[in-house]
Image (cartoon, helix red, strand yellow):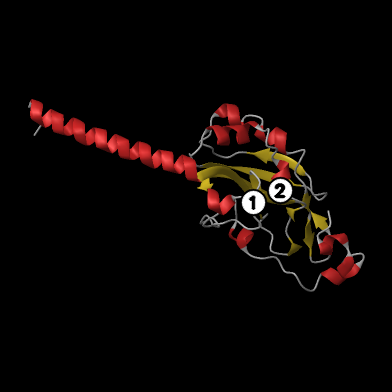
Amino acid sequence: MWCLTRACALVLGLVSGLAGTAHAQTSGSLTNSHETRVSVWSLSGSGRNDLLRRARPAGDMATWLPATDPLVRHALASFPQNDSVTLLFDIGADGRATDCTIPTSRLPAEITDGLCERLMPQVRYLPALTAEGERVADKARFHVRYGAFPRDHVRNTPLIVAEPLPPSPPVPMAGPGWPPLVSLKPARLTGGLPLLEGGGDAPEATGTP
């Protein structure tokens, strides 16, 4: 039944006002106790299961995305909202990105347009290696997530941080397609290093770019 009396309308207005006040207090508390942080991480996988090592980031991934990038500025302006975007890189045998696509994104087009072109020159991976020590091409997903984090937890941390592993690995897609199930399986780490030039002290073995 719709409320038509003046008294009922007054009660509804009071309740709405209290709810609005509570929301404002909550929002204000969030603003005062949280800060924006941008986190990045990467997963690799080309569907091959004969690799000694899959492509992995060389150096600090956080430096690939400068604080002046439109995506970071958008993250700061969107506080305290949370969102993310994923880029798919083709990684060549030299560890450089040869292609980049953004499959889906909820971010404004003016933010994602040109994002691949801005990041590709910065991207450096240690190339994937076969069991024989041959450098081969691979694929990698590069994830960027931003949101409001408790200030007590991120105090003295940079605006952009690199995660060594994804906080919540995505559930592999069933059936054919990318990413394949094998992309989440660890590459073999034994048996192939002695085949590399320089053995276990080779740059490919120690992780030196």
Q: Residue furthest right?
A: 198
Q: Is residue 3 visible?
A: no
Mark 2 surroundings: few (<14), some (14-19) or many (≥20) residues within 10 A: many
| Residue at 45% across, 43% down | 30
Residue found at x 59% / y 26%:
110
Where in the figure is residue 98, as x and y percent of width and height? Answer: 76, 41
Q: Which mark is residue 64?
A: none
Q: Residue at x 69, y 63 (%)?
A: 49
Name which quarter of the figure residue 88 lies in.
Answer: top right
- Counting residues from the N terminus, which is met first, the one under dot 2 or under dot 1? 1
Circle 1 Cα neighbour tier, 10 Å, few/some/many (<14 / 14–19 / ≥20) = many
- Residue at label 2? 61
Q: Are marks 2 and 1 in contact (CB under 8 Å)?
A: yes
Q: Is residue 76 above or below residue 160?
A: above
Q: Amino acid at mark 1?
A: Trp
The residue at the point 79 percent across, 49 percent down is 95
Query: What's the distance in space between the residues labelled 2 and 1, CA to CA?
Result: 7 Å
Where is residue 20 shown, x and y percent of the image?
Answer: 30, 35
Q: Is residue 204 left or right of residue 146?
A: right
- The answer to whether residue 154 is visible is yes
Instruction: Give the side of residue 75 with respect to residue 49, left or right.
Output: left
Q: What residue type is disc 2 on?
A: Met
Is 176 on the left or on the right of 117, as rendered? left
Q: Where in the figure is residue 70, as x and y percent of width and height?
A: 63, 31
Tag 1 residue:
41
